[in-house]
Each structure stands twice: as C-alpha cells, then as structure tokens.
Amino acid sequence: MTSTFLHDIGDTIRNAMATVPLSLVGWAFVAIPLVLLVWVLTCPIGDDDENRDPKHVRLLRIGAALALVLQIVIYGLL
C-alpha cells in the first residue's frame, strides 16, 4: 500500500495524541463537569421580568447539579 499525505496527517495526529499524559485527560474529564456545575449554580435563569415559577427554576437547577455531581463522582473514580 502506498502512503499518501492523508497517512502523514493521520500519523502526525496520532503522535500528538500519544504525547498527552492520561492523567491530564482524567483531570480534564473531572474539571469540565466541575466548571459546568459552578456555572449552573451561579447563573441566573431568564430575566427578572419573565413569569417563571421559582419552584420550577429551583428544581431544574437541583436536577442539573445532581447530574453533574454524579458525573464528577463517576469520572473521579475511573
């Protein structure tokens, strides 16, 4: 089989990915949901003039936070 420029691109990408330590990848998988958790807990939902039920907003925020905490725990254990 002859080698084309696409093979060279693939080899370059594979070599670049092989240089990334797996511990860094693991921390990234924990850090991304952690950042999202902070955002979910601190961001306002909608404008103040909108007619939103505060109970629904609170339940939505709690559900999102629980899902992100579960992801953090699972990824932290892996």
Image (tube, rainbow, N blue to C red):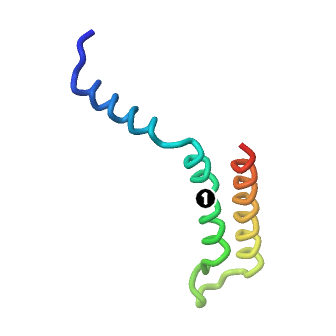
Q: In the figure, 28 relative to 60: above or below?
A: above
Measured as percent of width and height from the top left, residue 10 is found at 33, 29
Residue appearing at x 36%, y 35% in the figure: 13
Q: Furthest residue to the bottom?
A: 49
Q: Quadrant of residue 42?
A: bottom right
Give the crowd class for mark 1: few <14, some 14-19, many >=20 residues within 10 Å. some
When asked about the image quadrant of residue 61, the answer is bottom right
Q: How many marks?
A: 1
The C terminus appears in which quarter of the rendering? top right
What residue is drawn where x is 34% and y is 28%?
11
Give the left or right position of residue 16, taking residue 49 as reference. Answer: left
For the residue marked with disc 1, what is the amino acid? Ala
The foreground one among 54 and 22 is 22
Q: Nearer the viewer, residue 7 or 71?
A: 7
| Rendered residue at 23%/12% (across/down) | 2
Q: Residue furthest top?
A: 1
| Residue that label 1 marks | 31
Residue 30 in the image, given as x and y percentages of width and height: 64, 54
Q: Is residue 11 above or below residue 40?
A: above
Q: Is residue 25 above or below residue 49?
A: above
Q: Residue at x 60, y 89 (%)?
A: 48
Q: Is residue 20 left or right of residue 68?
A: left
For the residue labelled by badge 1, is the local secondary structure a helix, a strand or a loop? Answer: helix
Q: In the displayed structure, does residue 20 sit left or right of residue 53?
A: left
In percent of width and height, residue 44 lies at 61, 80
| Pick the front one: 48 or 76 | 76
Q: Quarter of the image containing the N terminus?
A: top left
Q: Position of residue 45 (x, y in %)?
A: 61, 78
Residue 36 picture quarter: bottom right
